[in-house]
Image: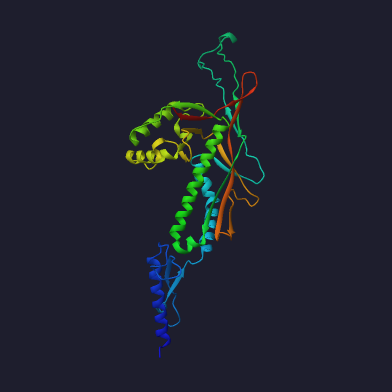
Amino acid sequence: MPTKLNTQISHEAEQARKVNLQTKHATIATHADSGWEQINMASVAPVRSEDGSEDGGGAMLVTTNVDASVFAESFAQSLDESLNDPEFIERLNESLSAEIRPYRSEPTPIQLALLADNSVRFNPTKRYADATDKPTTKVNFGQMVTVDKATDAVMFNHSVELYDFHMATAGFTELSLRRTVEQALVDICASMSSHCVDLLIDAKLTSKVEVTRPTGVPREQAEDIIDLLSVNLNAAYGATLSDYTLLIPSSLEAILERASQRAGVADVEDLLGCGVMEYNGEDRGLFLLPRRFTAMSFRSTADGDAFPVTLSRNVNKQAWVIEARGMIDLIASAVVEDADGIEVSLPLITQLAWK
């Protein structure tokens, strides 16, 4: 008659055998090879010490992710915490000014003073006998440049369906979840940049300059791009490239990344000397955004979230639906008064469009 200890050992051996099969066939979407009803990634950890045993008696705790809701809830929560983490906005501010404003409030316009130079040269050791001998200057007053939000805003929405069948057969791990969230963040940021590019062009907020598209090996293309940026930047909004943020098409990302490796620098931003953000979709060329004159303003919900993430259930498809949304106002519409006191628009952003 089998003892209780033998029964426990037999049960633990059966668990270990199941775990081995599940781990071995974790990426197979069919049940034929494994012989088990569900194939999932499993984790194994020693059970804590039991009474009268120092090592827990050799028992193993087996955790198998058999429920798709576990991944769906973890994905939605991780995406929500990642997008609404203050560090996310801080990283955006490294490339372009960004803010999250309170619920039902308007973005604060950017007010910049263009100072007029009224300096005068004089000799401090000389005595001036009369007014005609004194140095004079004509007093000029500078102007205030007001940069307000564009007429249109961008409301973005990203969603995905997670089917129970896919999650039950393919399985998931902590590492796969991290990669999924990271890819989602990359897609959302590139999409936001793409919508901002469309808004800038449609609202006629750019000064368009046609240039020849660089060709050749990555090093040559990077050098040509740096030359184009240096020649076409507006010194009134920034004297160096570090005063600007560059929007580039995603097709140039790999080329500039290779050029930065060839040059021995850390990344594309170090190579070009300015903040860089990529955009998806049609190649519209390069966009130079003066950092002090432009900004992105995200609207927040009543709960204080700029990027609310929702998780819902589609029973008809046996799937979980994860949806992330948000709204951006682009502060890039500048106006200034001319000599007659009439307000005129002032294009701040330079678009280098390919011929």
Closest to the observer: 253 or 305?
253
Q: Residue at x 51, y 49 (%)?
A: 87
27 with respect to 341 (left or right):
left
- Residue 299 vertical position relative to residue 311 in the rendered view, above or below: above
Q: Residue at x 51, y 33 (%)?
A: 289
Q: Position of residue 200 (x, y in %)?
A: 55, 33
**Residue 130 appears in the figure:** no
Q: Residue at x 42, y 84 (%)?
A: 7
- Residue 166 vertical position relative to residue 229 in the rendered view, above or below: below
Q: Position of residue 251 (x, y in %)?
A: 42, 39
Q: How many marks?
A: 0
Location of the C terminus (image quadrant) = top left
- Residue 236 vertical position relative to residue 322 in the rendered view, above or below: above
Which quarter of the picture shows residue 42?
bottom left
Location of the N terminus (image quadrant) = bottom left
**Residue 257 appears in the figure:** yes
Closest to the observer: 172 or 148?
172
Which quarter of the picture shows residue 146?
top right
